[in-house]
Amino acid sequence: MQNTGTLIVKTSVILIFALLLFAPFLFQDVRSLEVAARICIFIVLVASFDLLIGYTGIVSFAHTMFFGFGAYGAAILLKTMGPGWTPVILGALAGVGVSLVFAIAIGLLSLRVKAIFFAMITLAAASVVLVLASQLSQITGGEDGIIYKAPDLFKPATKLLTDADGKVVRLWGVRLNGKLAAYYFVFFCALALFLVMLRFVGSPFGTVLKAIRENEARAEAIGYRVVAYRTAVFCLSATIASLAGTVYAVWLKYTGPDTALSFAIMIDILLMVVIGGMGTMWGAVIGAVLMILAQYYLRDLMGAASEAMTGIPLLPELLAPDRWLFWLGIIFILLVYFFPKGIAGTAMAWGEKA
Amino acid sequence: MSLLSVRNMKTDIGQYAVLHDVSFEVPEGGVFVLLGRNGAGKTTTLRSIIGLWKPSPGSVTFRGEDITALHTADIARKGIAYVPENMGIFGTLTVDENLILATRNGRFDAARLARIHDLFPALAQFRDKQAWSLSGGQKQMLSIARAMIEPRELILIDEPTKGLAPSIVDAMADAFREIAQTTTILLVEQNFAFARALGRDMAVIDDGRVAHAGSMDDFAADTALQDRLLSLSV
């Protein structure tokens, strides 16, 4: 039987997915849809990173590199071949292929060494790829990135359903057009990838990963080749990150170093994993949602709070919207202090003791 | 032919030479006991057999096959299980997950599981509990049960009674007797009464060398030898 904490965490995650499913109808503005799509992508990205750091104890800084391979794969082919499904599929396959080559090479060559050296190697690989993406402007568009068109189905002008007059049908006030199709493409891809990961961690493969995280020598002594398992999970994680990159590229219709390869994204992923809780897929969902909501809405919230406190000494200045990163840092420190295992991890552990 | 043969094994850990010259033969069936003082090299011997430390020079032969250079995971798949001194369980996994890890196809053999639950009823009671929440004795039972969940030919067990209550030690002795009917046990033990009750053959390791090997009955009868090698009398 599941404990109360686990039940609360799982119910919250199901609620989040339900909100994301109906997001276009519940929050009918462009910015909210952007936020919802970003949350979907980052849930996958954070969960795939958690397969490494949380489930297996591997510290990698190359996760955005794999995300970038997937994004650039689709972007380059959509730019050169024009909008369509063929470049998306070929781009995804190319991204996954390149990711697997890098993951196998890095994994087999360096997963035997100590964690800190492995982390440094992934950092070096990610830095090289970031510099290459900026320098090879003929292919990648350099610092400016690549702008392209998504498949026709996702054009805002595309009418998914029309009425007798040929106008696009509205459902609960929302136009059933290509933008809505693009959002559901992102949502269902993210949901499918998340369910795949959930299946993996619940399988005997996931149990072996957790055993390796806890004690490599014991896992070896009962017959598991640790390097093989670590390389396998590194490849799986890279594949999923790469696919998330492709989906994000299709959604954004722009791919550049800042959206697909930057270290700022890597730091965001790390913070999301820590906030949500390492070693639990549910934590990835909670971490991604909280962090992205804070990134998008904390500034607005502080602006409103600052205005409301006009006349009170010091407080309006402290809550000035420009100081949002300072407050985000404070919130992060408090979260780590009060939820040392992340929100999901602490709640589940609390339920275990209760 | 003996089941396991250890020949002229020398193992260094870092810059320290722990085993200088260890040789002994483990016959098939029953319990073979390795005795010795603290720091004599008993644990290092077991860890060298399972491949966690590589002896050089020296050889370990299992059923006539040289397994010295094999990877630990491959040695384990030959049918050798290792129960480490510090109750080698995975604390964040449940009792059942700990057991299922040691199965070859990720599924329980119902008869074996029933036998384990008969031997260690607490493991049946706490199947879905995380292993860290078990008592010391239950953790040790889980560690031994994991070695039994698949058919094994040899189980290496390192000081299973360390820190356990006498009632649990008695239950463990009963369990070992039953296991030894079908599987050979190589037992490292400091509790001489426990070792004597179970062991058929034995060896004493002293300062990284085998100082004595023979039958347990003969050794138990020779108190002078015990005093010299173990600094204890029984």
Image (spheres, coloured by chain):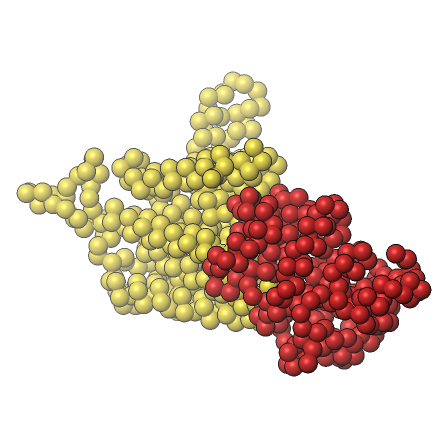
Q: Measuring from the top left, give residue B50's x and y in whole percent.
A: 67, 69
Residue at the extreme left: A164
> At 61% across and 50% down in the image, what residue appears?
B120
> At 72% across and 50% down in the image, what residue appears?
B170
In the visual, does B15 lie left or right of A179? Answer: right
Q: Is residue B200 above or below residue A269?
A: below
> At 29% across and 39% down in the image, what residue appears?
A22
In the visual, does A258 lie left or right of A121? Answer: left
**Occupied quadrant, residue B38:** bottom right
Query: Relative to the observer, which residue lies in front, A145 or A200?
Result: A200
Q: In the rendered image, which quarter contains the N terminus of chain B?
A: bottom right
State whether residue A53 appears in this view: no
Q: Measuring from the top left, give residue B15's x and y in whole percent.
A: 82, 70
Chain red in the figure, letter: B
* Colour applied to chain A: yellow
Q: Is residue B177 above or below residue B74?
A: above
Query: Relative to the observer, which residue lies in front, B153 or A56?
Result: B153
State whether residue A46 appears in this view: yes
